[in-house]
């Protein structure tokens, strides 16, 4: 191969390499700028979303003897809106025997009963009764459920049973 043809081939190769290198750099710049732009938008959206989620999820707990009140911190950061109130009952040994929950009604500015949970324990047998507030009957009678747990001496759960209505329960269903 003559030297001239060789130099011409090298020059063509160099030009093609420069064009390919320029195209690659240009594509890389576009890709980098696009990815940076998308990442910036995503970060801004996450920040805005997190800020609004934090404002909704700032809970304040107030405790008074056997009552726990749960409120949310309003957007002004100074006032509270009540949400839930729980009243607890204990036996003489300090074991919880009941929990009554109330929801705050904004329109009437009163606490409305929500559900009642009662617990009974005797040796290894633990019974939990749950009932929701029935507004028409003005009592805890809606969506009644009962769960019975049998706990071993090493505090492991041996067996359990749940029924959706208390009237349907018989001794044969327990274990």
Image (spheres, helix red, strand yellow):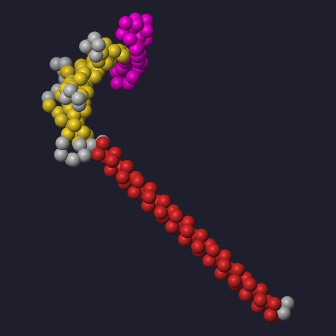
All told, the count of numbered labels is 0
Residue under the image location 62 percent in, 73 percent down: 24
Residue 34: where, in percent of width, then height? Answer: 52, 64
Q: Which of these two is toward me, 17 or 27?
A: 27
The answer to whether one can see residue 150 in this image is no
- Whole-percent x, y for residue 126 in the image: 32, 17
Q: Is residue 83 visible?
A: yes
Most extreme residue toward the bottom, as rendered?
Answer: 3
Question: For the magenta stretch, what is the residue range?
Answer: 147-175
What residue is rendered at 63% in x and 74% in y? 23
Seen in the picture, residue 79 relative to 162 is either above or below; the reply is below
Question: Residue 117, how many percent across, how many down?
Answer: 28, 20
Describe residue 102's horizontal placement relative to residue 16 as left or right: left
Q: Is residue 21 above or below residue 166?
A: below
Q: Spot the residue most to the right.
A: 1
Residue located 40% across and 57% down the image: 44
Position of 72 with respect to 20 (left or right) is left
Where on the picture, by quarter, is residue 159? top left
Q: Is residue 156 magenta?
A: yes
């Amino acid at each position: 191969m003559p030297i001239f043809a060789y130099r011409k081939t090298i020059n063509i190769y160099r030009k093609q390499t420069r064009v390919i290198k320029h195209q690659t750099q240009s594509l890389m710049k576009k890709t980098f700028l696009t990815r940076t732009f998308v990442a910036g938008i995503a970060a801004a959206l996450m920040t805005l979303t997190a800020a609004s989620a934090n404002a909704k999820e700032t809970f304040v707990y107030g405790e008074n003897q056997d009552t726990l009140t749960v409120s949310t911190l309003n957007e002004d950061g100074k006032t509270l809106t009540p949400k839930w109130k729980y009243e607890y009952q204990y036996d003489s040994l300090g074991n919880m025997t009941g929990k009554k929950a109330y929801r705050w009604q904004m329109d009437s500015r009163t606490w409305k009963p929500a559900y009642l949970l009662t617990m009974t324990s005797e040796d290894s047998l633990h019974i939990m009764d749950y009932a929701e507030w029935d507004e028409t009957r003005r009592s805890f009678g809606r969506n009644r459920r009962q769960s019975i747990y049998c706990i071993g001496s090493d505090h492991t759960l041996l067996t359990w049973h749940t029924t959706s209505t208390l009237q349907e329960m018989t001794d044969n269903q327990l274990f």
